[in-house]
Amino acid sequence: MFIRKLMTLTGIAALSAAFSIPALAHTHRGTAVGAGNADRTVTLADGAKYLNVRRNETVRIDVAGKSFAWRFDSFGTPVFKLGEIAPQGVDARDIMVYVAEDPASISGGD
């Protein structure tokens, strides 16, 4: 009886985790912010293939005349498509984002 309950609870927990992963995919890449909070502005030209940013950097991103601001307070240094975080109507699906480590968070070896 105990084993059956344990198996059921384990299965429910696994399903819950599996269904929550897509919801987390957006948030682990950072946070949408107001454009006035940006550290810098990047205008991506037609045909741009990539965007380089630093972890914890806030960037206003202009794509084809539309803009949004994003704080890359991500977990680690992910590589992902800009279209995964761009608001609806911003055509950024083929632009890759490369997140480098924040130099301020790297400790010295003294």
Image: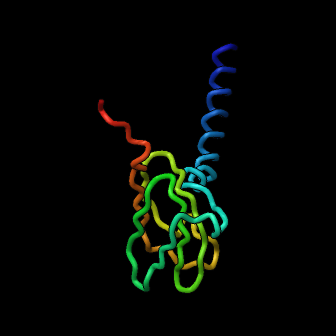
The image shows a total of numbered marks equal to 0
In the figure, is residue 52 to the left or right of 34?
A: left
Viewer-closest of 13 and 84:
84
Q: Is residue 74 above or below residue 108?
A: below
Quarter of the image with the C terminus is: top left
The residue at 62%/64% (across/down) is: 37
Q: Is residue 98 above or below residue 16?
A: below
Q: Name the quadrant containing residue 86.
A: bottom right
> Farthest residue toward the front?
110
The residue at 43%/86% (across/down) is: 46
Quarter of the image with the N terminus is: top right
| x and y, in percent, of residue 57 in the image | 50, 57
| x and y, in percent, of residue 76 in the image | 45, 46
The residue at 53%/64% (across/down) is: 39
> Farthest residue toward the top?
2
Viewer-closest of 63 and 23:
63
In the figure, is residue 45 to the left or right of 35?
A: left
| x and y, in percent, of residue 29 in the image | 53, 54
Q: Is residue 44 above or below residue 52?
A: below
Looking at the picture, the colour scheme in use is rainbow
Viewer-closest of 60 and 89:
60
The residue at 43%/83% (across/down) is: 45
Q: Is residue 8 above or below residue 96?
A: above
In the figure, is residue 101 to the left or right of 37?
A: left
| x and y, in percent, of residue 16 in the image | 66, 40
